[in-house]
Image: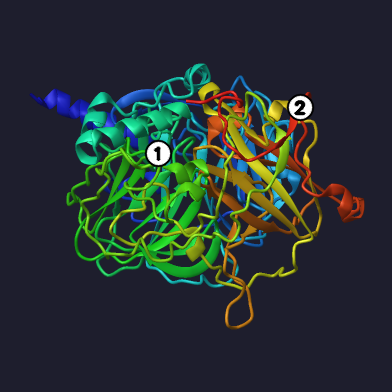
Amino acid sequence: MLNRRHFIGTAATALAAQSLLPAWAQSGRQGNRGLDPLTRNQFDLTIGRTPVRIDGRAGHAVTVNDTLPAPLIRMQEGEDIVLRVTNTLDEWSSIHWHGLLVPASMDGVPGVSFPGIAPRSTFEYRFPLKQAGTYWYHSHSAFQEQLGLYGPLVIDPARTEAQSYDREFVIVLSDWTFADPHRLFAQLKKMGDTLNYQKRTAADLAADAREDGLGAALGNRAMWGRMRMMPTDLADVNGAQYTYLVNGHGPDDDWTGLFEPGERVRLRIINASAMSIFNVRIPGLPMTVINAHGLDVRPVTFEEFQIGTAETYDVIVEPKDRAYRLVAASIDSSGQALATLTPRLGETAEAPPLRPRPLLTMKDMGMSSMMASDMATPAEPGMEGQGHALTYPETGEPGGTMAGMGMDHGDMTMADHHHPMGAGVANVAMNPVSRLHEPGLGLERVPHRTLSYAQLRSLRPNTDRRPTEREVEIHLTSNMERYMWSFDGVKFSEVEESIKFYEGERVRLTLVNDTMMPHPIHLHGMFFDLVIPDYDEDEDGERYLPGLHTILTKPGEKLSVDITPPERGDWAFHCHLLYHMHAGMMQVVSVLPRDDRPPLSEIGAGPPQATHPAETPVKHDMDHGEHGGTH
């Protein structure tokens, strides 16, 4: 029974927890009515350890100015910025300004662009702001990001905003664990699927047999068994270990944003999680994206989108006189972050139940050539015997998802790519294809409109339309069973040479995902123009490719981006899933003077070289037994 003493204690705990939150992250119940528009050009930030409460449970976080998430840094485009960061920890720390175009020495990656911030010392970041938009910042040291060191950045444009709005909120999504991240990583290293509690069971086999027949169900299990893989490998760490947060609030804390009916509300949505990809929706309330990764885009309206780790999307919503629930479900449907948008305190909306877990298919293994058609249905190879329980109860605009899902089959030929093989490369995609027209993994059958990369167009014409001078191809590689992650089969600790870009050149970077998981790949210090198949230019003769700083690469996907490196220096290039980066999926891109570029006939693809590479030309066939084996 809830007595008065208990009630007072609970209220005091909630109040204490709120006091640990910066003003922008506090709930409407604590008076937050939207972002403070005040900008500054100097900030003092202190990194330390702070006790926190998540959903009423106590934990310890690495914080900035004693808050989780960290303070909002709001600045003005064109200003010269000073950020003094004091590290009070007994370990080295750092802050990286994700997506900002800064000098290499200010990028904040220890061992790449600066030494780091020593214990009990202060480092001063100074740089001019060359851009506007929504960004975020986080530690690039050890697992401090997983422990809470992240916060939002908003840069107001020097000119008028492209879209008007009446109110704005920052929505910072993250994943919190009460476990020691070092222990989680150690568990993953011992067995890559040890934290996957979404595996199929004997009960699933019986259900699949009832729907598809016993032969199909057994055949499906045998196929996955031969490949030592599982169709449930969508997230290494999931809702069993994580509490998913909105602005530092767990689902029970229910962060609340207040609005006036009829307002245009701008939501600056940031995925600041360490390891989680989210499917974001507000049932009953369409979202119109106006800004992606800090850059304005043409408005596109949809009901749901997938946001990779480290991505940002700004959307406009126009809520009516009722409450709505904001839902950010993890990609494997193992948990969800929840928040409320409402015109009145105390009024909320019911949260939808978790959807059925999605399953991987042959397309996700880069075997699309073996599929009967572009659309993965339960009747197709790779889905046979997996049951038909992948239906979603929500109603919406029928066919919205299906529109624009054409596949690029123009590049279906197998191309040799030379990189080291061995225990760290358990799989190569036989026929990787472009999947930019598809919605996020697991959203193929939702009955409403979803956002895909191919729908994005920049608001303003691209400034560099030169044809690319050369192409660098990089394969994303892994042995999931041993939790080995790498680029081109070489983990970061064994890389001898950086990838070379040259200042001002136009270079195409092609990524091939040979793994069975999606990877948000981030390149520091520059934006890249996403190459969209079948799109060249608009009727006005201009090109409007979206500029991104991170690209969520689907399994079995091959995609390209065009880059004009703007600044010399060494820049980190990595998967933004923290444990993948820590395990080795990281490289350095060195931007060198243009005059240092060798003749194009001598450089070509330029993959990284291993210390002792057992380099073998890769023939793109699937023989998992020779490649070290996986699940």
- Residue 281, given in percent of the width and then of the height, sits at 32, 53
Judging from the image, what secondary structure is the residue with disc 2 in?
loop
Residue 431 vertical position relative to residue 161 in the rendered view, above or below:
above
Query: Residue 21 got which mark?
Result: 1
Residue type, numbered disc 1: Leu
Q: Which residue is mark 2?
A: 613
Horizontally, residue 135 falls left or right of residue 345, namely right
- Residue 485, given in percent of the width and then of the height, sits at 59, 30
Query: Among all residues in the image, which is located at the extreme left?
Result: 1
- Residue 112, given in percent of the width and then of the height, sits at 73, 35
Residue type, numbered disc 2: Pro
Horizontally, residue 208 falls left or right of residue 629, namely left
- Counting other residues with Cα less than 10 Å from the Cα at mark 2, is it few (<14), some (14-19), or many (20 or more)? some
Residue 234 vertical position relative to residue 599 in the rendered view, above or below:
above
Residue at x 38% of width, y 59% of height? 450
Judging from the image, what secondary structure is the residue with disc 1 in?
loop
- Of 159 and 402, nearer the camera is 402
Residue at x 58% of width, y 70% of height? 535
* Quarter in which the N terminus is drawn: top left
- Counting other residues with Cα less than 10 Å from the Cα at mark 1, is it few (<14), some (14-19), or many (20 or more)? many
Query: Among all residues in the image, which is located at the extreme bottom?
Result: 540
Residue 217 vertical position relative to residue 29 in the rendered view, above or below:
above
Marked residue nearer the N-terminal end (2 or 1): 1
Query: Residue 34 got which mark?
Result: none
